[in-house]
Image (tube, rainbow, N blue to C red):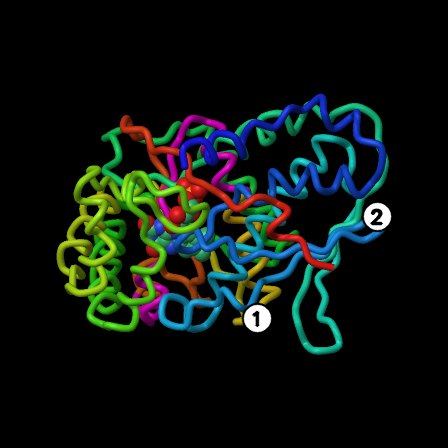
């Protein structure tokens, strides 16, 4: 497994310029795209390479009926992939534009168009690097505030995002509000794990620490020691761990100096995909500054959006939430299915 997680991230920049045609270049960029985060690391994306563009869509076979009943997290994950693709295409001076679209059967897709350019755009160097190293961490944050310059940069992106993506974003630094959000997430975890079907579905995506599976969450990502990681899928399946996991989430979230909540407005694939793009963009900016990010969507997923709106004073339903802060403990990089497994005609 480790081999896959490391190998899949060994992308040599210079190789891009030795590739002869658009198809090969697009395939090369997709190696970055697939490093995006996804619910339970299911990697619900599919790509279809055209003459000078790439269609990106959700693989509906990978919907999670209990973990993601509204399917919004699949589209948020798709948005993360697309943001990676666009940022590296910009780095290689290869990006043209993108369209959000639906095909005749009503399937939503995003078409990213490319054009030949010269050299690299150094403004995107840090993104090219961070996309390869980004991890979703779980754990307690250090007691250290986020520097004003980083907060300014995030705020700047959020202001731009409103007009560019049509996504509303809230940055929460108030300790009391953060604690309330932590409590609500713990409640969401309890609700989720009290449902046998949710637990059964989730257990299918939990791997032991030595597993060579290229999707799903390995025990080490949840801080499970080696031996325990072997029984973790069964423990999750057969026992309601909601209270314990809720407590752990509460501890981690309440230690965060910053929480970012995003809302795309409508409940549509377009809005969710835009949320995913912005979430990935902000995550990468944060990690460019050596900050760590942790995603926690249990409150949103389990129907506590109204309570969350009250806490943060939002007027639109939230779609995504992540914490930002400094953390000493390192998280391990996670595996991915290779691009070839995600291509379709
Ligand atoms: C839409 C979405 C929802 C997620 N929800 C949670 C969550 O509630 N709790 C959590 O610990 N991780 C959550 N994750 C993180 C994934 O588990 C993680 O991205 C995946 O295991 C791959 O790991 P990596 O991001 O470190 O590569 C979520 C990710 C996405 C994209």
Residue at the extreme bottom: 105
Q: Is mark 2 on a helix, strand or loop?
A: loop
**Can residue 178 be seen at all in this image of the molecule?**
yes
Question: Looking at the image, is 59 positioned above or below residue 23?
Answer: below
Q: Quadrant of the N terminus?
A: top left
Question: Looking at the image, is 143 positioned above or below residue 338?
Answer: above
Spot occupied by residue 36 in the image (x, y as percentages of width and height): 52, 45
Give the residue drawn at x 56%, y 42%: 157
Give the residue drawn at x 46%, y 55%: 42
Q: Which of 304 and 65 is in front in this view?
A: 65
Picture quadrant of residue 45: bottom right
- Categorize mark 2 by other alpha carbons within 10 Å: few (<14), some (14-19), many (20+): some
Which numbered disc, 2 or 1, marks the residue closer to the eye? 2
Q: Does the magenta stretch include residue 243?
A: no
Q: Which of 330 and 289 is in front in this view?
A: 330
Q: In which quarter of the image is the C terminus?
A: bottom right
Spot occupied by residue 166 in the image (x, y as percentages of width and height): 61, 58
Q: How far apart, in angstroms, are the residues tagged by discs 2 and 1?
A: 27 Å
Give the residue drawn at x 19%, y 56%: 246
Q: What are the residue bounds of the magenta stretch?
A: 281-307
Q: Indicate which disc, 2 or 1, sits on the residue closer to the N terminus.
A: 2
Give the residue drawn at x 78%, y 37%: 94
Picture quadrant of residue 11: top right
Residue 268's tag is: 1
Residue hosting label 2: 52
């Amino acid at each position: 497994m480790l081999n896959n997680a490391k190998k899949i991230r060994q992308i040599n920049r210079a190789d891009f310029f030795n590739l002869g045609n658009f198809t090969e270049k697009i395939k090369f960029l997709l190696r970055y795209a697939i490093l995006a985060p996804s619910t339970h690391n299911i990697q619900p994306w599919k790509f279809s390479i055209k003459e000078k563009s790439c269609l990106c869509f959700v693989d509906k076979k990978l919907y999670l009926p209990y973990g993601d009943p509204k399917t919004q997290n699949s589209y948020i994950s798709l948005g993360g992939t697309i943001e990676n693709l666009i940022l590296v295409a910009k780095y290689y001076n290869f990006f043209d534009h993108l369209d959000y679209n639906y095909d005749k059967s009503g399937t939503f897709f995003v078409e990213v168009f490319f054009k030949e350019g010269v050299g690299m755009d150094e403004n995107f160097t840090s993104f090219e690097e961070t996309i390869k190293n980004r991890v979703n961490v779980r754990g307690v944050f250090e007691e250290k505030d986020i520097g004003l310059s980083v907060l300014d940069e995030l705020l700047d992106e959020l202001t731009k995002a409103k007009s560019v993506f049509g996504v509303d974003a809230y940055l929460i630094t108030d300790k009391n509000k953060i604690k309330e959000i932590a409590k609500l997430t713990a409640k969401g975890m309890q609700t989720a794990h009290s449902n046998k079907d949710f637990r059964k579905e989730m257990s299918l995506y939990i791997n032991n620490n030595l597993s060579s599976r290229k999707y799903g969450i390995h025990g080490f990502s949840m801080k499970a020691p080696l031996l325990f990681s072997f029984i973790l899928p069964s423990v999750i399946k057969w026992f309601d761990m909601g209270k314990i996991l809720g407590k752990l989430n509460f501890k981690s979230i309440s230690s965060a100096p910053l929480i970012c909540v995003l809302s795309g407005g409508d409940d549509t694939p377009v809005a969710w995909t835009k949320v995913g793009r912005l979430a990935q963009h902000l995550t990468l900016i944060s990690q460019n500054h050596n900050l760590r990010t942790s995603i926690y969507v249990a409150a949103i997923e389990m129907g506590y959006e109204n309570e969350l709106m009250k806490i943060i004073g939002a007027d639109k339903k939230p779609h995504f939430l992540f914490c930002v802060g400094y953390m000493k403990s390192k998280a391990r990089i996670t595996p991915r299915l290779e691009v070839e497994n995600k291509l379709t005609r």
